[in-house]
Structure formats: C-alpha cells, structure tokens
Image (cartoon, helix red, strand yellow):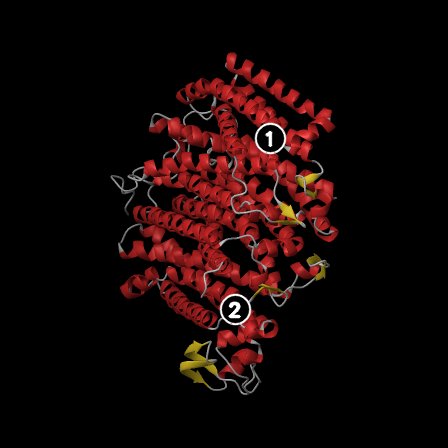
Amino acid sequence: MDMTALMLSRLQFAFTVSFHIIFPSFTIGLAAWLTLLETLHVITNRHVYRRLFDFWLKIFGIAFGLGVVSGIVMAFEFGTNWSRLSEVSGPIQGPLLSYESFTAFALEAAFFGVLMFGRARVKPLSYLASVFMVALGTTLSSFWIMVNNSWMQAPVGFDIKNGQFVPTSWMQIIFNPVVWVRFPHTVLAAYLTGAFCVAATGAWYRLQTRYGAESRVMLRMGLFLAAVLVPLQILFGHLNGDYVHQLQPAKFAAIEARWHDEQPAAEVLFAWPDDLRETNHAEFKIPYLGSLVATTRLNSREVGLTDFSRADRPPVAIPFFSFRVMVACGLAMLALAWLGSWRALRESLDGSRRLLQAIFFSFPLPFIATLAGWFTAEVGRQPWTVYGVLRTADSVSPNLTVSATLTTLIVYGVTYMGIFSFGTLCIYRVLRHGPGAIPPSAVETPLRPMTLGNRDLDGSGEGARP
Amino acid sequence: MNTLWACAVALSTCLYVLLDGFDLGVGMLSAFAAKDDVRRDMMTAISPVWDGNETWLVVTGTILFGAFPLVYSTLLSAFYLPIIGMIIALIFRGVAFEFREKSTWSRPFWDRGLSLGSLVATFFQGVVIGAVIRGVPMTAGHFTGPMFFWLSGFSVLCGIGLCIGYTLLGACWLAGKVSAKVDVTAFRCIPWLMAAMSLFIVAAFAISVYTHLQVMDRWHERPYLATFPLVALIGLVFLLRGVHSRACRVLFPAASLIFVAAFATLAASFWPYMIPFTVTINSAAAPPSSLKFLFWGIGVFVFPLTLVYTGVVYRIFKGPIRGGYGDS
C-alpha cells in the first residue's frame, strides 16, 4: 500500500482508538464493580468489601488515568486528521461529542478526585454517591460514543445542505434502533471485561492460596455475573448481526467471506480470503448454515461481495478473521463462566486446579473480543466514514503531509507503548501485592501523607496473608 | 443563538486557562523542587483536581466541534503539529500522577514527565494563541498554509509568555496550600515571575507595533478595549500587596483577575471573528437544529450543573491541605 497522509491517518486513528478502547472497556466494568462493592460495604459493613474496594480502586486509578489521557487524543483527532469529516458532519457528531464531554467526561473526572482523595473528607453516603457518579459517567460516555459511532454506521435523521450534514431529527439519531443494539453490546462487553478480570484475580490468589476470603468473593461474583451476561451478550451480538445484514450488506458479505450470491448460502468457517482474485483459499464451509445464521431460514438468498463495485467493498480479511476471533473468545468465555459457576455453586472450585488456571489465564479474552469486535465494525464500514454517504478518502484533512503524519504516528506509537507497558507493570505490581489490610486511617482517620498506592509495593510489605 | 455559543466557548476556554493553568504552572514549578517531599507536596495540591480541570479543554474542543465545526476543523488541522505536541505532553503530565507513586527506579523519569509535559503543553498553547493573533492563512474559507506556518518569533514569544503566566498562577495556587517549604518556594518566585511577565508584555507589545499586527488596528477603532488592561492593573496591585503582606488567600484570585482581563482583551479585540480576521461567529456556526439541541440539553441543564458540581468538588478540597488527604 502506498504511504499517503490518508493511509497514515487511518493507521493513526486505528492505533489510537484501539489503544484507547482497552481502558474504557476495563474501567466501565470496574466502576460498576466498585459501586457494587461500596454499596455492599455500606449495607453489611463487612471488611472484606472495603479491602476489595481499596484494592480495585488502585487498579481503577491507573486504568482510568490511561483512559483519560488517551481519550483526549480522540477528542482532537477528528479535527487534526479528519478536518473534512468534522467540518461537514460537525453539526451532528459535534453536539453528540459535546454531550459526551459534559455528561460523562466532566462528571467522571470531577468525582474521580473525590474517589481517590476524598474518603476522609466526605460522609460515607456522599462517598458512595461519588462512586456511583463515576460509574454513571463512564457508562454515559460509552452511550454518547455509541450514538455517534452508530450514526456513522447507519446515518439517519439528516439532510445535506451546502455540502454539510444538517440534523433534522435528533429523536431519530438518538433512538436509532442500531444504537440500542450496539450500546448494550458495548456495555455488556465492558461488564464482561470487569467480571473476567475480577474472577481471574480471584483464581490467581486461590491458586497461590492467598487471600481466602477476598478470592472467594471475587471468583463467585465474577463468575456468576459472567454466567448471566455472556448469553445475553451473545444475544445482542446476534441482534448486531441483524442490523449489519439489513443495513450494511457489503460488510456482512465481507464478514462471511462470501464472494458471490448464494441460495442457500453456506457458512465459511475458515478460509484465506483473496481480495484480488475475489475468491477464498483453503476454504472450509458448511452448507445451509450461512442462510440459517443470516435469516434463521435454511434457503434464503445471501448477497456476495461481487454485487458491489470494488470501490465500495471493505477489505475482506480483517472483518472475516476478527469476527471469528471475537466469536471464539465469546464461546470460550461462555464455557468458562458456566463451568466455573457450576463448580462454584457446588463449592468444588478448589478441587480443580486446571479450571482455576484456565480462569486465571482467561483475563485477556474479553479485551481481545472487544478489540476484534471493533475491528469488525470499523474496518467493515470501509470505504466509508459515514456509511454510504461520505468516503474515508474525502474525510481526511487536505493539508496533511506524509512526513508530518508519519512523525505523529511514530510519536503516538512510542508514547503509547511506553505508558502502556508501564501501566501494565503498575497494575501487575498492585495485583501481585494483593488487597492487604485496611489502612489504619479507615478506623481512626488520622492525617497521613498522601499516597495512591502502597509506597512499599515491591519491597518489604507483603500485606495480610490469610 | 450563535453569539450565545460563542460566549460558551469563551467561558469554557477561560475556565480551562485558569484551572488547568495553575495545574500546569505547578507542574512546571515542580522542576525546581529541591527534594522529593517538596515535589510530592506540590502534586498533592493539584492531584484531586487536575483531571477535572483538563476536562475543560475537551469541553471547549467538543463545543467548537458541535457549534462551530468550521473553526474546529480549520484550527485543529492547521495547527496539526503543535496540537499533537500539546496532547503528547498532556499525556506525560497526566500519567505522571499515577505512575510516580507506583514507580521505584523510574520515578525521576515520571517527575520529568510532569514538569516537562507541563512546560511543553503550555508552550504549544501559547504558540497557537500567538499564531492565531498573527493570522491563519485561509482562502475561500479553508486553511491553505504550510505545515509550519505557526512558527514565528512572535508565536514563540507567546509560548514563553504563557509558560511564565501559568507558572505565576501555579505559584499563587501553591502559596499557603500544602506545606511551609512549598510556601517559601512560591513566595520567592512570585516577584520574579511578575517581573518576567511584565517584560514579556512589553516585548509582545513592541513586536505587535513593529510588525503592524492587524490586532493593533482594533485598538484604534475600539478605545474602550483599554478598560481590560486597567482591570489587569488592579489585579496586579492586589497581587503585589498580597505578596508583600503574605496574604495567601488574595494571591490566586488576583492572578486570575489578570488572566481573565488578558483573555477578555483578546476575545474583545477579535469579536465578531472566531479566527481573526477571516471566519466570523455567524459564518462558522452550525445549523440552528444543532445549536438548539445543544442549548436545551447542555445550555440550560448540563453546563450549569457541571459548574455546580465542579464547585462542590473544589469545596471538598478547599483550604490548606497540610499533610495530605488523610485516608488515601
């Protein structure tokens, strides 16, 4: 591929958004989990909830910080690299992102300070309210982002006047059915991410026979939640497929790697799609299943990619593979959540080291699934930014030079890799150290020097062992 | 409606400059902290609020995106490199708060991240302001300048000037806030910063006259603009008296007054242009259906609410914080 400012801008956006999405999808789930823990702590006054809260708050703090700094990039990247898009779609995307920055970004940022530093300065119920505000903020954030992104996927409620998108019905834009299948899909993904990270941490301590009470709470809450949410998520995934089938047939055909119309359509389980020759290599497919997946009927006619001119097709390999990766992760999570919950109910989790190990190693699955889902949705939307109306090639800032864009791409890359590695190291250190005891200040509230984490993280203090 | 949203942009920009201004100023001052505990005390003064303060930058950006898409798209793409430079610097500034506490051998690196990140972010903000004052090359409503059009002696001077200004704000915020050691640093540097600031203003004024900047014509047309520098002068007097009598509570409001006056001077000289002197408020405004949607949700309800809870959070962390926040 030629190195153009357009290509580099696309790479830059893909890189920065992929990096960013890891953190919100983690913190939305964690914020909900923190709200739950603090509520339980207020109601039951059991110390284990407070210890878990303090412990996960440290991790939340790191992930939230990374989410904030990488989110600011997104708020400006529309303008820096996609000035044509932001100029013509600003009247629609701009207000949506304004709502995001006000109802979400500002809310969570203001109360994040209270969360991290304010416990001794506010009443317990006000503190709980602050935790809830942060959780509300993170969720509202994903809502507005999904309204905005869904409008780009399936634009509604607008006219084009003087080359600019003019909103005609905000009701249509916000209550677009596409929003209401994609937003739950995203939030569920975030909750699953939180659930699996919590359960994996519990499994880790269980394997090390540390923190008995805490690991029990984490394992059970994480697994039970996942056992309920994974099936729900698969249902919403299916509903997402329906909207793609109906509104974005080219994307659907790319996900299925279907080059020609078929009736009945087969389902390609594996293949090596070849854009140039318009065919698949090493194909393995199951007859009838393609129709069944698309319409729940056995002999429906399904469109192939060759129905669309080459200029209107997305690249095939990325949506095809990323969709399969997402589904595979989902099925693996379903198996783990159900098996783990069943054994947890029978109090026999400790009997299976292998299962605990599997749960421990499962924490990357929801992250991979989320990223793969985004790739499917976003690469599948190509070659459009606003589906069917505005092409990606017509959206890029016209003044960008290759050298400037390449420079910023490299700088972003180095910066993100650096802070990501260190952030992961920090989270790992907190996890390795474990929940520890409640700070004495929680009981007597004396003033002591401010710290976010434990100062002696990787040294003397090992915290409480059961 | 257009004017209203232009005022909202002005208000949120002004809030950003004041609030994140002192964060960035404290960040720059932290480079001069002799010992680790002094640096930590300095960070204590801003760590609960920096994130909320930075939000006003995002808020400004997204209001521009929604209400004045042409301004958003033109300025951000025209200032591609300085904007991204600023963002990268803000990334290092932001992660430093969490990372330095959890690091061992790499702590000096994250400390540099805080001070250099604050410095570079402020510098680029000043450069952008300077370059906007000099004018953005546009033809037929679109930016047509080269990649480095923003780089000039005047814009670099503005970058340095803003660094001095934010540091002054930061020093005023720190005085009397966390610990005696920090107070000493703050009080020692405020007079120097005020002197440097005055020097900058004289230099900037001289260049403006010498190069016949278009803004200067505005001053001939609108003599009433001179009231704002007078207000700044009042702020300066209060600041001097505050330093002299060690009245910590006067310092930050006085410094803020100077900043608000400076901001108002610029805004009033540009009026009704958003990008001087090519794009006006009305020519950049989004269609009425966008502005109404913004007005009935954000304008009437969310914006005031945001101001209220921001105030509440500041009340929670109000006053001197000697010895940290208690329970972490």
- Residue A370: where, in percent of width, then height? 46, 62
Q: Is residue A447 visible?
A: no
Distance between mark 2 and mark 1 Cα atoms? 53 Å
Q: Is residue B247 left or right of residue A336?
A: right
Q: How many marks?
A: 2
- In the displayed structure, A157 sits above or below B266; it is below
Pointer 2 local density, CA inside 10 Å: few below 14, some 14–19, many at least 20? many
Q: Amino acid at mark 1?
A: Thr
- Residue A151: where, in percent of width, then height? 62, 61
- In the displayed structure, A335 sits above or below A119; it is below
> Relative to the observer, which residue lies in front, A232 or B183?
B183
On the same chain, marks 2 and 1? The answer is: no
Pointer 1 local density, CA inside 10 Å: few below 14, some 14–19, many at least 20? few
Q: Secondary structure at mark 2?
A: helix
Q: Secondary structure at mark 1?
A: loop
Q: Is residue A270 visible?
A: yes
Disc sitting over residue A405 in the figure:
none
* Residue at figure coordinates x 42%, y 21% from the top left: B185
Looking at this rendering, what residue extends furthest in the left direction? A460
Q: Is residue A318 left or right of residue A200?
A: right
Q: Amino acid at mark 2?
A: Gly
- Residue A136: where, in percent of width, then height? 55, 49
Disc sitting over residue B211 in the figure:
1
The quarter of the picture where the N terminus of chain A appears is bottom left
Q: Chain of mark 2?
A: A
Which residue is denoted by mark 2 in the rendering?
Answer: A380
